[in-house]
Each structure stands twice: as structure tokens, then as C-alpha cells.
Image (cartoon, helix red, strand yellow):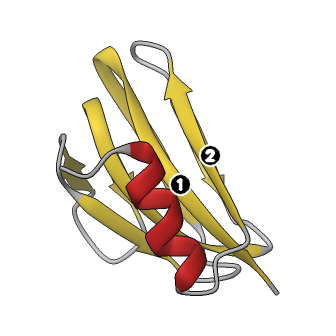
Amino acid sequence: MPSFDEFAQARRAQGFDEVAERHWPPEAVVPTHAHPFAVEALMVAGEMWLGTGDGVPRHLRPGDRFTLAVGQPHDERYGPDGATYWAARRHA
């Protein structure tokens, strides 16, 4: 797995303008919402389930990546230990 700095540098080279480390508490639930930016993320700790309305939510663990398009509705549920992921954002 890359370091945070390596992840951030590679995403900025791809045109992402913001990179952040996101921490979520145990058992957190985020209802369906959307963002005004595209996301490319890498799970680094814990687990989450990401629902995008296209069937069964995707179960993500450390090393897994996910992407979201600008305005893509999604919901999130975090595991018993919470989760951490690195998120690169590309604002329109």
C-alpha cells in the first residue's frame, strides 16, 4: 500500500485538487447523499459498506479502492471498528 504522501502526489498528478484522510467512528451510518466533486479513495483501516443504488452494497476493507462520480448518490455504513480512507477530490 502506498504512503499517504505517495497517494496524494499520484492523485494530484491525475488532476485531483484536494486529498484528505477521513476517519469514521464505529457503526456510523451516512444516509444517501451526493457530492459536488468526484472522488477516488483508498481504504486504509477498518471496513465500510458503500451503496450506490445498483444492488448489494460493496464491502470495502484496507487496500480496496472506490470511485464516485460528481453528483452520484450513495450511502455509507461503517464497521464495528470504524474506518479510515484517503479521499482525493476533483471539484468541477
Q: For the residue carrying disc 2, how many other residues have a C-alpha within 10 Å: few (<14), some (14-19), or many (20+)?
A: few
Left or right for 13, reference 61: right
Q: Earlier in the sequence, mark 2 or mark 1?
A: 2
Asked whether the viewer can see residue 48, the reply is: no
Above or below: residue 58 compared with residue 12? above
Looking at the rendered structure, the kind of residue marked 2 is: Ala
Name the residue tied to disc 2: 20
Instruction: Specify the quadrant of the image occupied by residue 85.
Output: top left
Q: Position of residue 3 (x, y in %)?
A: 33, 45
Looking at the rendered structure, the kind of residue marked 1 is: Ala
Instruction: Work out whether residue 23 or residue 13 is closer to the camera in this orientation and state it.
Output: 13
Above or below: residue 81 compared with residue 87? above
Q: Position of residue 11 (x, y in %)?
A: 51, 73
Q: Label 1 near label 2: C-beta < 8 Å?
A: yes
Name the residue tied to disc 1: 87
Q: Residue at x 57, y 63 (%)?
A: 88
| Cα gap from disc 2 to disc 1, whole angstroms | 5 Å
Q: Position of residue 48 (x, y in %)?
A: 31, 38
Above or below: residue 54 compared with residue 56? below
- The C terminus appears in which quarter of the rendering? bottom right
Q: Dot 1 lies on which element?
A: strand
Q: Dot 2 lies on which element?
A: strand
Asked whether the viewer can see residue 34, the reply is: yes
Instruction: Work out whether residue 92 or residue 73 is closer to the camera in this orientation and state it.
Output: 92
Instruction: Specify the quadrant of the image occupied by residue 33.
Output: bottom right
